[in-house]
Image (cartoon, grey):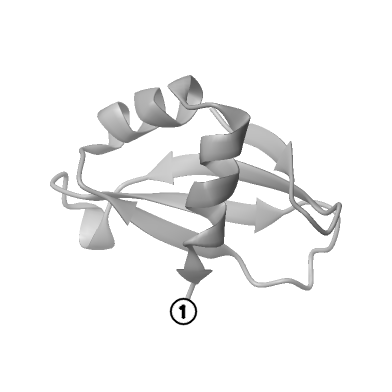
């Protein structure tokens, strides 16, 4: 399930948990896609949790913590 939020530049983003590289369950990624400007590359941050736990964490964190997580994300390559 994706969660949407607005960044400091008033862009709307969606965040969702995704399995880690090659589908390995040991480290999931939180992926951020910009919904208001599709030309912006997606971003991601790695969590030290399996994908289901990463999704639970994503749903439970506050909006401010989600924004801090987003600010630490790197462009998806």
Numbered circles on residues, count: 1
Q: Residue at x 69, y 35 (%)?
A: 4
Pick the residue in front: 9 or 34: 9
Left/right placement of residue 58 relative to residue 71 reads left
The image position of residue 48, as x and y in percent, is 20, 46
Q: Residue at x 47, y 27 (%)?
A: 61
Secondary structure category for the residue under label 1: loop
Pick the residue in front: 73 or 38: 73
The residue singled out by tag 1 in the image is 77
Mark 1 packing: few (<14 Cα in 10 Å), some, or many (20+)? few
Kindly give the residue lying farthest to the bottom in the view shown: 77
The image position of residue 2, as x and y in percent, is 58, 33
Q: Is residue 17 above or below residue 42?
A: above
Q: Based on the displayed image, in which of its 4 quarters is residue 15 positioned?
A: top right
Q: Is residue 17 above or below residue 38?
A: above
Q: Residue at x 21, y 39 (%)?
A: 49
The image position of residue 34, as x and y in percent, is 73, 56
Left/right placement of residue 25 relative to residue 28 reads left
Left/right placement of residue 65 relative to residue 47 reads right
The image position of residue 42, as x and y in percent, is 60, 65
Q: Residue at x 29, y 37 (%)?
A: 51
Q: Is residue 21 above or below residue 70?
A: below
């Amino acid at each position: 399930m994706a969660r949407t939020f607005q960044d400091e530049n008033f862009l709307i983003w969606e965040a969702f948990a995704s399995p880690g590289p090659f589908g390995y369950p040991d480290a999931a990624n939180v992926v951020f896609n910009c919904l208001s400007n599709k030309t912006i590359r997606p971003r991601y941050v790695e969590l030290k949790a399996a994908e289901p736990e990463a999704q639970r964490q994503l749903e439970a964190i506050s909006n401010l913590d989600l924004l801090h997580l987003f600010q630490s994300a790197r462009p998806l390559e």
